[in-house]
Image (tube, coloured by chain):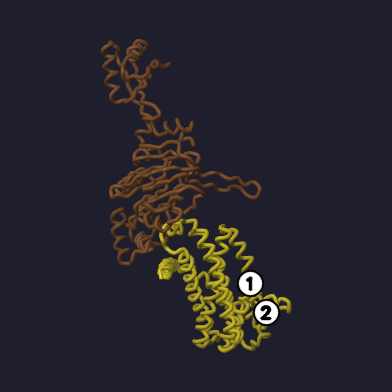
Amino acid sequence: MIETSGLRKSFQTGRRRRTATVDAVSGLDLAVAEGEIFGFLGPNGAGKTTTLRMLATLLQPDGGEAVIAGADLRTEQAAVRRSIGYIAQGGGTWDDVTAREELVMQARMHGIGKAEAQSRATVALDAFDLTEYADRNCRTYSGGQRRRVDIALGVIHRPKVLFLDEPTSGLDPQSRSHMWDEIRRLRAEGMTVFLTTHYLDEADALCDRIAIIDGGGIVAEGTPAALKRSIAGEVVTVGVADAAEKAADVLAEQQCVRSAELRDDGGLRLAVDIGETAMPQIMRALSDAGIELATIELHRPTLDDVFLAKTGRSLRES
Amino acid sequence: MKTLRDIWLVFQRHMLLMIRSPLSILLGVSQPVVYLALFAPLLKPALASMGAGSMTAAYRIYVPGMLVALALGGGLYVGFGLLAELSSGVIERARVTPISRVALLLGRSLRDVVTLVIQAAIIIVLAMPLGLFVHIQDLLLAYVLLALITLSSSAISYGIALKVSNPNVLGQVVNNLAQPLMLLSGTLLPLALAPLWLRRVSDWNPFSWAVVGMRALFAGHTGDASVWQSIALLAAVAVLALAWSARLFARSVR
């Protein structure tokens, strides 16, 4: 549904003699399948918004190609615009206009007739739980309501592809999970969703597939589960009442354990492939050897560990 | 056809916004009203040089000039609204739709014309008890002229706003542009008082021609050459200014 190759964009920064060219996006190759929620995960300034704005026809790429819903981004902008919806990070509604009026206006900007625009607005208000506030001015809305209006505006013309820039940035946890549900519902209706986020949990929970972007390029791509598996297996830590060294020897012989390491605090750190199946085996082996198990804990790698492994720094810090 | 529909759509939206905050129209008209009440009587002796023997005659000279000043000054400040919309994201939202780019600008310009028409009507009605009298055909021609001035000044303002893209800089530029244009068109102080070289400079100011045409209309001289000359000149200026700003806009928002 979206395919890019070598997409790039650079900006001039500074003034007069101190100008410098900054590569915001350098040579991006992407493929997003129909009906998938594709996430672009990366720290601020990584090039997420720039990429999104290029794909949404708002910014002219310096080079490279992209095809969106069968239309060439460079030569068929009008066709691209017909099949996409775009929702900016900051949204974009007039303060003194109601959500219903905005929805009708947005539909009409897409060339939809007045009567049809009005009925679509009513349907959209209902679908996004906005009917109650439909005839109040946008300035009175809460952050979550405002964001739902933004999304309703972005999909009023039933696009094939929806671009979402930081859909839940600044929302409270309840509004966030509400927003996730809305996005999943759009996918269930057959829409392809391309979103950017700097939230690890959002990329993990919401996206079918993600690309990790840093410094204008993709450093890793895949399903969240595969990405986490790719960097390292899972880790089980075991605490025993006594005979820690013997326990280490016993466990090192187990097939499911790749390596066993005795830590300074007397606990054992075991690298395993799949934690769920390894844990019962570890427990059984210890009990067979007559060693009393005090604690056992499973650590799964997070997307932050993936980010750390690929870029050398934590996403939380950057 | 599609462009016309899109212009109408954008115009409707901006009219709605205007109706929701009518205060801006009244605030825009408050300064001219103060001038009407306080400044015009002061000027009567000065206007005598233009044939104002009575207060009524003074208003007949002063009001048309002030209307031009209103159209010129009011129009030059509309760029702020455009910058606010550019930064709020509403224009970006429109840009992702197939709506005509030119319509996004022309719809606004039409709203500016309507604003001016309402403000001008308020001033004319307020000036009537003071002795102002205009024939309906002269008034309609005056409105045509005012609309052309507003289209020009607002288009210039949008163009500058797109060039500087910073409200603070826009304010400076507009101030520096509005002052000489106003003074050199004789809207507030009559140019008859000016030395000859200043009058020659003002000949190059199209808005100065507009003031002469407006005064002829308010004096009832419909057939005066200055009337068609000023309308033709301002029509040309409006077309040029609109073309310039529309091109800038289309390029900056693609």
The subunit carrying tag 2 is B
Q: In this view, does A180 lie to the left or right of A17?
A: left
Mark 2: few/some/many CA within 10 Å (<14, 14-19, 20+): many
Q: How far apart are marks 2 and 1 (CA)?
A: 12 Å
Tell me which amino acid carries mark 1: Leu
Residue A225 in picture, x, y percent from top left: 34, 34
On residue B191, which mark appears?
Answer: 2
The chain assigned the colour yellow in the figure is B
Does label 1 lie on the same chain as label 2? yes
Residue A135 in picture, x, y percent from top left: 34, 61
* Of residues A290 and B19, the one drawn nearer to the viewer in this rendering: A290
Q: In this view, does A60 lie to the left or right of B194?
A: left
Tell me which amino acid carries mark 2: Leu
The colour chain A appears in is brown
Write down the quadrant of residue B153 in the picture: bottom right
Residue A58 in picture, x, y percent from top left: 46, 54
The subunit carrying tag 1 is B
Q: In this view, does A190 lie to the left or right of A63?
A: left
Q: Are the residues flagged by discs 2 and 1 in contact, CB closer than 8 Å?
A: no
User: Is residue B49 visible in the rendered structure shown here?
Assistant: yes
Residue B104 in picture, x, y percent from top left: 46, 64
* Image point (58%, 63%), residue name: B160
Among the two numbered marks 2 and 1 on one chain, the one whose residue lies closer to the N terminus: 1
Query: Is B62 above or below relative to A10?
Result: below
* Image point (49%, 56%), residue name: B87
Write down the quadrant of residue B238 in the picture: bottom right
**The residue tagged with tag 2: helix, strand or loop?**
helix
Q: Mark 1 points at which residue?
A: B181
* Image point (29%, 18%), residue name: A282
